[in-house]
Image (tube, rainbow, N blue to C red):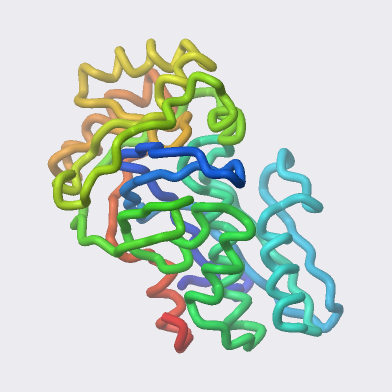
């Protein structure tokens, strides 16, 4: 938890995630899909700051213009918590977006989770982490993993979570110049929806296949070209529904070296995979009993 220079406002992290693999095992009667995936939390992401007020209103400022305030998931999360706990106070949210939209890194879901966790603390709502996760599931399937804040094996819609120890890992994220709509991928008739379920011990907690990748390549054929090019540096894999591609490296030095080589071709970032969300550390430092 850090303060923005010159303002004193606390900066609360909203970390990104990657899916080390993603299998779709079926389609449910409610239209959602059953899946199995392995989430790793990253030590990098968006940053949020909150100012509590007596207005009862929720407002938001963002450093990019492409996310309308009225439909922002942070605003929706805050209002959901407000209604659930009959909170009379308001809040102004200052969102610094670093995670690209449509990147498959869970940026919106993480922003919602940070909003729920921090406002639960600042408003004194007193909800437990599981209660917040259930609220978060109303906003998006990936919100619960960010609420609990641990790398995890996930099943169901992504809400059945088992914390795992992946250890510190090192990646280079490659951001293509386009985003991919999650809804469009999951609506696509060619999406593979019948992967046989696997057992957690059979995966070795290693990166594997992503059932969304073939559809993403059909929607954006240039994705295949990028991945073929990146094969010179390792095994490129797509996170979630894309468009971000990640490469794993043995250590931080190797990741930084590859990022330096790739930055003349692509928008890239070297990041660390962690097992515990930095947000949990910030909340613990603030004395929040939820974590």
Q: In the drawing, does residue 7 fall left or right of residue 277?
A: right
Image coordinates for residue 156, horizontal then vertical, percent: 43, 52
Residue sitting farthest toward the front: 29
Q: How many marks?
A: 0
Image coordinates for residue 4, horizontal then vertical, percent: 56, 67
Image coordinates for residue 33, horizontal then vertical, percent: 50, 42
Q: Residue at x 60, y 70 (%)?
A: 116
Q: Residue at x 29, y 31 (%)?
A: 209
Q: Residue at x 41, y 82 (%)?
A: 284
Q: Nearer the viewer, residue 129 or 66?
A: 129
Does any portion of residue 136 appear in the rendered image? yes
Q: In the drawing, does residue 213 fall left or right of residue 185?
A: left
Image coordinates for residue 229, horizontal then vertical, percent: 30, 13
Where, quadrant-wise, is the C terminus in this rendering?
Answer: bottom left
Above or below, comparing residue 240 to residue 229 in the picture: below
Q: In the drawing, does residue 209 fall left or right of residue 167?
A: right
Q: Residue at x 55, y 21 (%)?
A: 189
Q: In the drawing, does residue 204 fall left or right of residue 286?
A: left
Above or below, comparing residue 290 to residue 257 in the picture: below
Q: Nearer the viewer, residue 178 or 182?
A: 182
Above or below, comparing residue 26 to residue 258 in the picture: below
Does any portion of residue 5 appear in the rendered image? no
């Amino acid at each position: 938890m850090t303060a923005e220079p010159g303002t004193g406002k606390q900066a609360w992290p909203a970390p990104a995630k990657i899916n080390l693999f993603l299998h779709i095992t079926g389609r449910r009667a409610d239209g959602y899909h059953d899946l199995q995936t392995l989430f790793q939390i990253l030590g990098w992401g968006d940053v949020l700051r909150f100012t509590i007020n007596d207005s009862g209103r929720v407002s938001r400022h963002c450093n990019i213009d492409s996310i309308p305030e009225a439909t922002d998931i942070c605003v929706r999360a805050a209002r959901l918590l407000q209604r659930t706990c009959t909170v009379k106070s308001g809040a102004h949210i200052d969102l610094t977006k670093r995670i690209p939209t449509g990147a498959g890194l869970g940026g919106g879901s993480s922003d919602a989770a940070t909003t729920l966790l921090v406002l639960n603390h600042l408003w004194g709502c007193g909800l437990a982490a599981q209660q917040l996760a259930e609220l978060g599931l109303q906003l998006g399937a990936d919100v619960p993993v960010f609420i609990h804040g641990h790398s995890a094996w996930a099943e169901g819609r992504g809400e059945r979570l088992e914390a795992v120890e992946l250890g510190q890992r090192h990646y280079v994220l490659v951001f293509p110049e386009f985003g991919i709509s999650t809804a469009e991928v999951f609506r696509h008739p060619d999406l593979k929806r019948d992967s046989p379920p696997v057992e957690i011990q059979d995966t070795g907690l290693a990166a594997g296949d992503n059932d969304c990748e073939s559809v993403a390549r059909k929607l954006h054929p240039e994705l295949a070209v990028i991945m073929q090019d990146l094969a010179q540096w390792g095994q490129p894999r797509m996170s979630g529904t894309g468009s971000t591609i990640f490469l794993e490296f043995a250590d931080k030095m190797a990741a930084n070296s590859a990022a330096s080589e790739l930055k003349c071709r692509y928008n890239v970032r070297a990041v660390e995979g962690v097992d515990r969300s930095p947000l949990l550390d910030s909340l613990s430092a603030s004395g929040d009993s939820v974590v």
